[in-house]
Image (spheres, grey):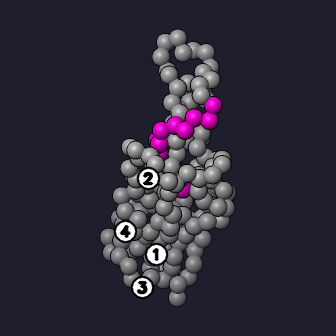
């Protein structure tokens, strides 16, 4: 890792090795950024619009939260707070660690550092399989198009290529 590459999403996109989830061994663990997993009102809806990921990838909790916000906002504007129900189908369990190197004057040569050092916990992530559902929005028939459009636009925030699937509930 060159000294300018700290905390780039690209460094964490692929999940190499075993996922690390043992939080009891780590002091100062990162706080989860996802505000809520379900929003809107549970009820009787016509359609379920799902956001699927086409590849095996690791998604950080910031990306999940911004996707959730971007997907819910337009639907909430049109359908109102009780006209839809959306929820996240993933939870970030994996702890991402980083062995920080010195980035001061004189540290211009590539640092070797300690091999396979444990590192500090910097972020949380979720590992998803190809074809796994990340979030879904339940809507009535008249709001189907806005739900599809909002999920398509929210996909930009994800590190993977998405697919949108509509399931009829009736």
| Residue underneath mark 2 | 24
* Total tally of numbered discs in the picture: 4
The quarter of the picture where the N terminus appears is top right
| Residue underneath mark 4 | 39
| Residue underneath mark 3 | 44
Give the number of the mark in front: 3 or 2. Answer: 2
| Residue underneath mark 1 | 138
Q: Position of residue 77 (x, y in %)?
A: 35, 64
- Graded by Cα atoms within 10 Å as few (under 14), some (14 to 19) or many (20 or more), the crowding at tag 1 reads many
First reached walking from the N terminus: tag 2 or tag 1 = 2
Residue 104 sits above or below residue 167 on the image: above
First reached walking from the N terminus: tag 4 or tag 3 = 4
**Spatial separation of the CA atoms under disc 1 and disc 4:** 11 Å
Residue drawn at x 61%, y 65% as measured from the top left: 132
The residue nearer to you, when weighing 168 against 30, is: 30
**Spatial separation of the CA atoms under disc 2 and disc 4:** 30 Å
| 78 within the magenta span | no
Per the image, label 4 sits on a secondary structure element best described as: strand
Give the number of the mark in front: 4 or 3. Answer: 4
First reached walking from the N terminus: tag 1 or tag 3 = 3
Q: Position of residue 85 (x, y in %)?
A: 41, 73
Residue drawn at x 52%, y 37% as measured from the top left: 119
- Graded by Cα atoms within 10 Å as few (under 14), some (14 to 19) or many (20 or more), the crowding at tag 2 reads few
First reached walking from the N terminus: tag 2 or tag 4 = 2
First reached walking from the N terminus: tag 3 or tag 2 = 2
Residue 116: image tag:
none
**Spatial separation of the CA atoms under disc 4 and disc 3:** 15 Å
The region drawn magenta spans: 115-126
Contact check, label 3 and label 2, Cβ < 8 Å: no
Contact check, label 2 and label 4, Cβ < 8 Å: no
Does the image show residue 159?
yes
């Amino acid at each position: 890792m060159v000294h300018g590459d700290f905390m780039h999403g690209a460094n964490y996109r692929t999940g190499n090795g075993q996922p690390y989830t043992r939080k009891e061994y780590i002091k100062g663990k990162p706080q989860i950024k996802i505000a809520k997993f379900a929003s809107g009102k549970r009820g009787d809806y016509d359609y379920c619009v799902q956001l699927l990921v086409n590849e095996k990838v690791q998604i950080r909790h910031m990306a999940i939260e911004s996707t959730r916000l971007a997907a819910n906002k337009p639907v909430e504007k049109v359908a109102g707070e009780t006209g839809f129900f959306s929820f996240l189908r993933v939870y970030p369990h994996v702890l991402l660690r980083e062995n920080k190197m010195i980035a001061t004057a004189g540290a211009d040569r590539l640092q070797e550092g300690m091999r396979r050092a444990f590192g500090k916990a910097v972020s949380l992530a979720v590992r998803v399989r190809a074809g796994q559902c990340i979030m879904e929005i339940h809507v009535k028939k008249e709001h189907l198009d806005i739900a599809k459009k909002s999920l398509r636009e929210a996909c930009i925030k994800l590190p993977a290529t998405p697919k949108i699937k509509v399931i009829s509930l009736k």
